[in-house]
Image (cartoon, helix red, strand yellow):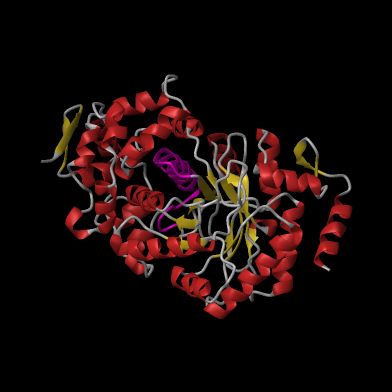
Amino acid sequence: MGYASTIGAQRFQFPDLRTLMARATPARSGDELAGVAARSGEERVAAQMALADLPLSTFLTEAVVPYEADEVTRLIIDGHDRAAFAPVAHLTVGAWRDWLLSDAVDAAALSALAPGLTPEMVAAVSKLMRHQDLIAVARKCRVQTRFRGTIGLPGRLSTRLQPNHPTDDAAGIAASVLDGLLYGSGDAVIGINPASDNVAQVMRLLQMLDAVIRRWDIPTQSCVLTHVTNTLQCIERGAPVDLVFQSIGGTEGTNRSFGIDLALLGQARDAALSLQRGALFDDGTRGANVMYFETGQGSALSAQAHHDCDQQTIEARAYGVARHFEPLLVNSVVGFIGPEYLYDGRQIIRAGLEDHFCAKLLGLAMGCDICYTNHAEADQNDMDVLLTLLGVAGCSFIMGIPGSDDVMLNYQTTSFHDALYARRVLGLRPAPEFERWLEAMKITEPGAPDRLADALPAAFGRLLEKTA
């Protein structure tokens, strides 16, 4: 089939859809490593021009990863809702961009459209957008999920309290949990990356977190970020599992490299739902979003399972996987994999905005681990920029880690203070259930959820009394 575009006297040819998408992608080191990036700025612009003229319906007839060879492609195509797609079915990618940015399109329209979108469609339109476009459209999206608290409401910014410890020391973890709670962090989840990833240790950490949540009556949920098969064994042994975690990718081969497939994820979701640990809300429904997924641009290339696609398109396909399992939380660990995939602060910022935009359009309560590794050409100022931009864009949650330095995973991310900064300057608040708890514990001032109480030492004492 092929696609073409002309700039001046030069004509550029793109043999298939995956090549067109890759060449249209803003520059990043991972695509250059894979050999799929545009070879010049002119070629990138030519590809973007050809992509803008491409009918959206093309994505329903030409797959970037073969249908016969990949269960993720089959999930995307077989689950497509043509009735939801109908309002934009006649548009090109470029015309759809204009439609998304128009004042006539609001949160309700975007919510109704989400089941009709494929990941490749949203990846394509993101390649035609400036940063402000990605922010403006994502801000209009409203995606709400619930377990013991409500994530994704307008004007709210939640946090994952991440109390990692290099030896899983209980006292060290407890100190980080207490520190985070006193800064208003933890409404999305209290989630530990275990240093010792075995079932016995995971069970011990789950029991510890459950005891903390129950003793302090905290309207949040816990998660130990272990492999899904470990969590299934924990459930079988009676452990207090709130959320099931798993890293996921956008191709069958990537997921196989993680030791998973779609059937296993479905089994884990069913097991977690059977526990019925979510809160019973005022409307009579029980919190039933029980999955927590993490993703990252470059994971498919690391697994040699990218099918010659650009990493951002494959990342969007991971959101198609996540959407199928109705998770409470999804986040991109945007700069964690390293400079081989996102070289510097500029590339990390762009990727973070793309990831958030694509996931929100697909109907996910999307967060971001705003982070970088110490060998990347990035620093905390770059993270401040991305944090602020994502806050404006309506990001559902971010990470909260003591001093922004994860001492177990050895990377730089956002701190409890960073979350407090974002809430203050942007007028954002925690999840409503958690906000009421903070006020009841006198950690924050009533009616001023971004302001720590003057009597914070007294709040510290009250928490310690409950622990005794």
Q: Is 349 in the magenta?
A: yes
Q: Position of residue 445 (x, y in %)?
A: 81, 40
Residue 321 sits above or below residue 92 on the image = below
Q: Is residue 100 left or right of residue 251?
A: right
Q: Is residue 447 left or right of residue 391?
A: right
In the displayed orientation, state which residue is furthest to the front: 284
| Magenta segment | 339-364
Q: Is 260 in the magenta?
A: no
Q: Nearer the viewer, residue 449 or 354?
A: 449
Which quadrant of the rendered structure holds the N terminus? top left
Residue 180 sits above or below residue 17 on the image = below
Q: Residue at x 84, y 44 (%)?
A: 453
Q: Position of residue 232 (x, y in %)?
A: 47, 71
Q: Position of residue 443 (x, y in %)?
A: 80, 48
Q: To which quarter of the image does residue 308 belong?
A: bottom left
In the displayed orientation, state which residue is furthest to the left: 1
